[in-house]
Image (cartoon, rainbow, N blue to C red):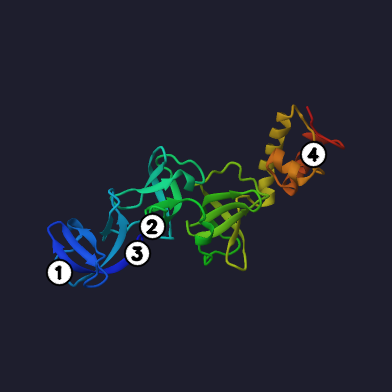
Amino acid sequence: MRLGEYQKLKVIKKVEFGVYLAEKDGDEMRVLLPEKQVPQDCKCGDELEVFLYKDSKDRLIATTNRPALTLGGLAVLKVLEVGKIGAFLDWGLEKDLFLPYKEMTVKVQPEDEVLATLYIDKSRRLCASMKKLYDLLSTASPYQKGDVVNGRVYEFSGNFGTFVAVDDKYSAMIPAHEDTGMLRIGDVIEAKVLGVKPDGKLDITLREKAYLQMDADAEKVMGVIEEFAGVLPFTDKSSPEVIKRETGLSKNAFKRAVGHLYKERRIEITEKSIRKIK
């Protein structure tokens, strides 16, 4: 019998509180399907498709209800409660699904909706995890370059970028050079597809076309200049790392914004600084 999966089992015995199921007659390994779950007119010898999990007393039990998540799958689940050692998620069964703190990518709160997978822990119990979702996402999306998509942020990587699950199931990424500092794990975003990689993964962007984004970037740069008391101690010739760290913009976006501000005569540029014109 496979914990955390759907399977067809045979009714081998009827009792007052339900029926016992097994893979075949004579099996010593059997599981209870509670009486309220038993279909009408069910009889010994019938095959039933059930899902196996463990009840509050850690006993293997069957259900004909269909949980939102099966072993190795992905689903968006709502946080019901947060305790001392983890959180409890609603997955459509009487016993809530446990999400250990060590399997969180960010501390969750009640009412949060998180993308999670299902695994079996060392104690042979079903638990949820927010980690290692990358390989579980599909690369067979219907989207092409230029399409607008919705996705859920599930991981940040300084080396690669921001990982997003488009439609909660397709693999996508926002490039590392793009500012995603305003986002948090679980946020649902609208983005545009920049391209589709040979392996089917999507490259996406939050940014508008450059000429539409320029005004917003220019105001962002002015805000940073104000934070430096009107004199920015670096220019558009500085390293991409410095520019990214101080402004959140890529070097190209920063250069466009600075050029825009210069044309509007709002700044002056020296060899080592950018100064606000009063």
| Type of the residue with mark 3 | Arg
Q: Is residue 24 above or below residue 51?
A: below
Q: Is residue 20 left or right of residue 151?
A: left
Q: How many marks?
A: 4
Label 2 sits on residue: 69
Q: Is residue 217 left or right of residue 268?
A: left
Label 4 sits on residue: 262
Question: How busy is the neighbourhood of tag 3: few (under 14 within 10 Å), some, or many (20 plus)?
Answer: few
Chain-order first, disc 2 or disc 4:
2
Q: CA distance from mark 3 to mark 4?
A: 66 Å
**Residue 46 in which image quadrant:** bottom left
Q: CA distance from mark 2 to mark 1?
A: 29 Å
Chain-order first, disc 3 or disc 4:
3
Chain-order first, disc 1 or disc 3:
3
Q: Are marks 3 and 4 in contact (CB under 8 Å)?
A: no
Q: Secondary structure at mark 1?
A: loop
Q: CA distance from mark 1 to mark 3?
A: 23 Å
Query: Can the viewer see residue 149?
Result: yes
Residue 222 locus on image (x, y percent): 71, 34
Residue 75 locus on image (x, y percent): 42, 55
Residue appearing at x 64%, y 53% in the figure: 160
Q: Are marks 1 and 3 in contact (CB under 8 Å)?
A: no
Label 1 sits on residue: 43
Label 3 sits on residue: 2
Residue 76 locus on image (x, y percent): 42, 52
**Residue 50 in which image quadrant:** bottom left
Question: How busy is the neighbourhood of tag 4: few (under 14 within 10 Å), some, or many (20 plus)?
Answer: some
Q: Is residue 39 left or right of residue 196?
A: left
From the image, state whether disc 1 or disc 4 is nearer to you.
Answer: 1
Chain-order first, disc 2 or disc 1:
1
